[in-house]
């Protein structure tokens, strides 16, 4: 899938998306951090890398509780950082 900027968007498989969702709402939102969930997220990031992904947007702020740059073979883009950068750019424009 490509967008107007020529960026190819690669999304995890339906099974991987379900796992991501379940970890967020059944664990992270309740302050539960599990090593097996971290390993599962790392596998998903690895699958995305194999599919050609060059970086990963963490689509939920809670994911940063589980995955950091040290846990990923790809660069990560956390939502708060993306929003802060956009706010600065808007303010300086």
Image (spheres, rainbow, N blue to C red):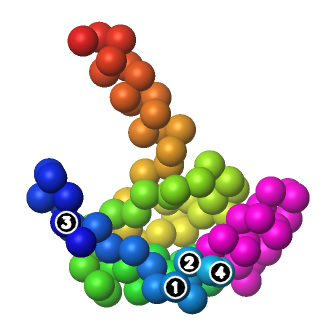
Q: In what element is the residue under mark 1?
A: helix
Q: Nearer the viewer, residue 34 or 84?
A: 84
Which type of secondary structure does the marked residue at label 3 adopt?
loop
Q: Earlier in the sequence, mark 1 or mark 3?
A: 3
What is the distance, in whole Å, between disc 1 and disc 3 at their CAs? 19 Å
Q: Earlier in the sequence, mark 3 or mark 2?
A: 3
Circle 4 packing at 10 Å, graded few (<14), some (14-19), many (20+), is some
- Say whether disc 4 or disc 3 marks the residue closer to the N-terminus: 3
Q: Quadrant of residue 30?
A: bottom right
Which residue in the protein does label 4 denote?
Answer: 19
How far is the residue under mark 3 from the one under mark 2? 19 Å
The residue at the point 38 percent across, 19 percent down is 88
Q: Dividing the picture into quarters, in which one does residue 90 lie?
A: top left
- Give the Cα separation between the discs numbered 2 and 4: 5 Å
On residue 14, the disc is: 1
| Picture coordinates of residue 7, whole percent (x, y) | 19, 60
| SS class, disc 2 | helix
Determine whether label 1 and label 2 are within 8 Å by CB.
yes
Mark 3, other Cα within 10 Å: few <14 / some 14–19 / many ≥20: few
In the image, is residue 66 above or below residue 79? below
Whether residues under marks 2 and 4 lie with C-beta atoms below 8 angstroms apart, the answer is yes
The alpha-carbon separation of the residues under discs 1 and 2 comes to: 5 Å
Highlighted magenta segment, given as a residue range: 20-38
Residue 81 pos. (x, y %): 47, 38
Residue at the top extreme of this rendering: 92
Report the mark closest to the observer, 1 or 4: 1
> Which label belongs to residue 17?
2
* Discs 1, 4 touching: Cβ within 8 Å: no
């Amino acid at each position: 899938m490509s967008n107007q900027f020529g960026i190819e968007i690669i999304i995890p498989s339906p099974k991987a998306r379900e796992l991501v969702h379940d970890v967020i709402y059944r664990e992270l939102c309740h302050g539960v951090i599990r090593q097996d969930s971290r390993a599962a997220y790392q596998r998903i990031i690895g699958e995305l890398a194999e599919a050609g992904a060059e970086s990963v947007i963490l689509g939920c702020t809670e994911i940063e509780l589980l995955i950091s740059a040290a846990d990923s073979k790809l660069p990560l883009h956390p939502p708060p950082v993306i929003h802060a950068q956009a706010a600065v750019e808007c303010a300086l424009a």
